[in-house]
Amino acid sequence: MCEYCERMNGFGPKRNLLTPELIACAQVIENALPGTPAPADAWTIVSGAASGSVEWTYLDRITKSLDAAAERLASEKHR
């Protein structure tokens, strides 16, 4: 990180909001979608456990699945 960024108030490493619970729920949702499921390495990259690029069609599926999983888990916590 550059010196300027280190001095910025409130700047710091972002907390990874992709919890194992959220990822597991999203993978179940994604597998139920029509079409070819995203490969495991795409999930690894999106989760931040590895670096690399993800094909757009897989990234789109994963993102939609993560959104749906977040909504599902939030609604379960409010019951």
Image (cartoon, helix red, strand yellow):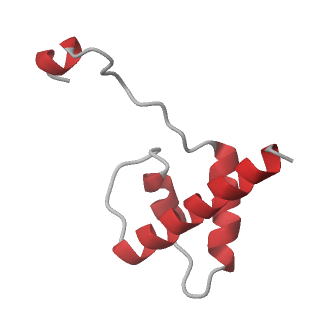
* Closer to us: 75 or 34: 75
Q: Residue at x 41, y 47 (%)?
A: 50
Viewer-proximal residue, 50 or 66? 66
Q: Residue at x 57, y 59 (%)?
A: 66
| Image position of 68 (left or right of 53) | right
Extreme front residue here?
A: 78
How many numbered discs sit on the rendered protein? 0
Q: Residue at x 67, y 69 (%)?
A: 29
Q: Residue furthest right?
A: 79
Q: Is residue 76 above or below residue 36?
A: above
Q: Position of residue 21 (x, y in %)?
A: 70, 47
Relative to 26, say whether 30 is above or below: below
Q: Is residue 39 visible?
A: no
Provide residue 54's location: percent of width, then percent of height. 36, 65
Residue 42: x and y in percent read 46, 63
* Residue 28, horizontal then vertical, whole percent: 70, 67
Q: Quadrant of residue 37?
A: bottom right
Left or right, residue 41 beside residue 76: left
Image: 60 above or below 14: below
Query: Which residue lies at the image location 63% right of the left edge and 81% below the top edge?
Result: 33
Residue 22 in sight: yes
Picture quarter with the N terminus? top left
Q: Quadrant of residue 48?
A: top left
Position of 25 with respect to 78 (left or right) is left
